Image (cartoon, rainbow, N blue to C red):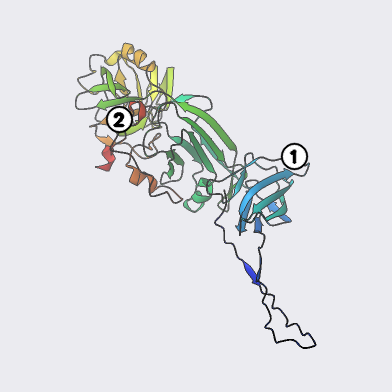
Amino acid sequence: MGLRRRTALVAVTVVATPLVVGGCTTDRKPVARPAEQVVPSPEVTLTPADLSRNVPLSAEVVPLVTGGEITAVRLVDDTGTLVRAEPREDGSAWVPTVPLRPQRTYTAAVTATADSGRTTTRTTTFTTAAPSTKPQVTSTLHLADKQTYGTAMPVTIGFDPPVARAARADVQRRLFVTTNPPQPGAWSWVDDGSQVSYRAPDFWRPGTTISVRAGLAGLPIGRSHTGDADRTATSRIGRQVALEIDNATKQMRVLRDGKLIRRIPVSLGKRSTPTSSGKMVIMEKHQYTTFDTRGEPNGGYVVDVEDAQRLTWGGEFIHGAPWSVSDQGHRNVSHGCTNISAANADWLMGVTQVGDLVTVTGTEVRLESGNGWTAWNTSWGQFVKGSALPVPPDLRPARARALAGGVPTPGPSASDG
């Protein structure tokens, strides 16, 4: 990928000198030769500058080219070992596919070629910094490698401590997502900077492969912190499943590829501990787990449950609750979870995937941003406002149609009014 080319042609004019000849000749006017044009070679400037020291481990090779486009980039370490690098989508930089190592010397050679065929190769040699003594921001990539996820699965990364607003653009530039087939999306931060999520305007198409890299190792994050690690994962999107839970009817509708396959009676959170309304995503699935709420507000109990599927960080699950079967479909008695029968819970575990969309409506409270993977709990217009970098204006939902495989496009959630 080349940068916009500005080719300057420098004209050099050679003026013919009159020829003086003796004897009987008539005067002749000098004949002017055609002007000759010198086609310049491309100009290339590189960052990091040559002989730079204390370069961050997250450094990228940034070429500025005039009068041509980049045709080759080669990066080697001080042993001559090739370091693979890939161009950014806009061609503005070449990014090493693995973190650079501390206190090592690297040499980058960049070749640019003009339309005329002339080439220029520039090199820069730089040395990376020693390991930083600054505290690290711990990052957690909530996408495992070689898994199958639901069509609403956002790429979510958590940060501890949260990333300050002024540093979010630098962090976001080091977050890379590719999909096959291509389905571009955008990143969006929760207000406190503890989480950033990536999704497309519409749900993922079944069969899509998602590859993620959070290249944060050694990245300066503000003045006081650095990134902790380079994390990668590649996984696949499976069939489309969605759950719709209505407090008014006390029923759950289970849909696969847009078709209703079962209705399940539910008991939601009682008035003192209500279930959240909103669009959430199944985060975890446990055949057996223990809820221990001692020390929490409105808690104080310990109970073993089966077939539990997490919806929020705050502890809202869908799970088997044989003790409340007589209430399911009629009244709310839980501490915020969605209670269903043991048989229905066992069946549902075989149908759902992490990343399936769960929509709850009609309860007393709304889902808080960041309480779980809440990337779908807002309109696309609101979602992209959380990006620290510009989002292409033509990236928008295809609301007029359903996606391939029966995947519906998301409408506004309850939080959009």
Q: Quadrant of residue 7?
A: bottom right
Q: Residue furthest front?
A: 24
Please say if 367 is above or below 48.
Answer: above
Whole-percent x and y of residue 145? Answer: 53, 27
Whole-percent x and y of residue 148? Answer: 46, 24
Q: Quadrant of residue 366?
A: top left
Whole-percent x and y of residue 367? Answer: 32, 36
Whole-percent x and y of residue 323? Answer: 29, 14
For the point 29% across and 25% down, which residue is it?
A: 258
Classify 10 Å Cα crowding around label 2: few (below 14), some (14-19), many (20 and above).
many
Tag 2, which secondary structure?
Answer: strand
Visible residue check, residue 303: no
Classify 10 Å Cα crowding around label 1: few (below 14), some (14-19), many (20 and above).
few
In this orientation, which residue lies closer to the viewer: 27 or 314?
Answer: 27
Callout 1 amino acid: Thr
Visible residue check, residue 67: yes
In this orientation, which residue lies closer to the viewer: 271 or 385?
Answer: 385
Please say if 334 is above or below 192.
Answer: above
For the point 61% across and 66% down, which residue is it?
A: 9
Q: Residue furthest top?
A: 343
Callout 2 amino acid: Thr
Tag 1, which secondary structure?
Answer: loop
Horizontal arrangement in the rendering, residue 358 relative to residue 160 (left or right): left
Quadrant where the image shows the C terminus: top left
The mark total stands at 2
Q: Nearer the viewer, mark 2 or mark 1?
A: 1
Residue marked by disc 1: 81
Residue marked by disc 2: 359
Mark found first going from the N terminus, 2 or 1: 1
In this orientation, which residue lies closer to the viewer: 206 or 234?
Answer: 206
Measure the C-alpha gap from mark 2 to mark 1: 52 Å
Circle 2/circle 1 CB separation < 8 Å: no
